[in-house]
Image (spheres, rainbow, N blue to C red):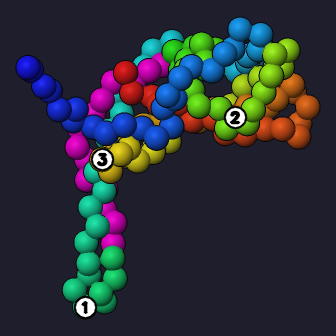
Amino acid sequence: ISYQMKEFGNMPLDPITKTDMSDVTIKTSIELKDEGEKMPVYKEKITKIPDDNELVTKKEHVRDVEILSPKEAFQKLKQGDFDPIISFKAGDTLVITDYNIDYHADSKGFSQPIYVFQVRLNDNGKDSWSQPISARR
């Protein structure tokens, strides 16, 4: 039996199952680029300063990885390939108002790139949240 070990760990924000988006509208008026790029993956190293006995965390560059384009990450949202932070129901509209790239630690301690979408429920201004999506291809 052939077994290949994954270099990086699992992302805790990756969904176990897809979210049913068949009766949910998701839209945006912001521009989403078509092309992805490369982003670094880091491994956090915790060291102790000898004289102070304080712990210091340093990010060590592991390598660059290909990431999804913002448009591809938006498609993951539309297809329900995310773990929703706020529950919604059939007939609801999710409005994407902004996004940025950030980092999130995986199960092996690697900091991997993620997209964080700002989402408003039914465009009402009170129900909003930041929805993370793994950016790695």
| Residue 66, image quadrant | top left
Secondary element type, mark 1: loop
Q: Position of residue 119 (x, y in %)?
A: 73, 31
Q: Could you tell whether 26 is left or right of 8 in the image?
A: right
Q: Where is residue 108 in the image (x, y as percent from the top left)?
A: 30, 47
Identify the residue under disc 1: 51
Q: Residue at x 9, y 20 (%)?
A: 2
Q: Would you place residue 67 above or below residue 42 in this image?
A: above
- Judging depth in this view, the residue of 33 and 26 nearest the camera is 26
Q: Earlier in the sequence, mark 1 or mark 3?
A: 1
Marks 2/3: CA distance?
A: 27 Å
Q: Does the magenta stretch include residue 13?
A: no
Q: Main secondary structure of the magenta part?
A: strand
Secondary element type, mark 2: strand
Residue 108's tag is: 3
The three-letter amino acid code for the residue at tag 3 is Lys
Q: What crowding class fits label 2: few (fewer than 14 Cα within 10 Å), some (14-19), or many (20 or more)?
A: some
Residue 122's tag is: none
Q: Give the residues drawn in magenta, as a range.
A: 56-70
Q: Can I make out residue 97 in this image?
A: no
Q: Residue at x 30, y 87 (%)?
A: 53
Q: What crowding class fits label 1: few (fewer than 14 Cα within 10 Å), some (14-19), or many (20 or more)?
A: few
Please name which of the two marks, 1 or 3, marks the residue nearer to the observer: 3
Identify the residue under disc 2: 118
Q: Where is residue 52 in the image (x, y as percent from the top left)?
A: 31, 89
Please name which of the two marks, 2 or 3, marks the residue nearer to the observer: 3
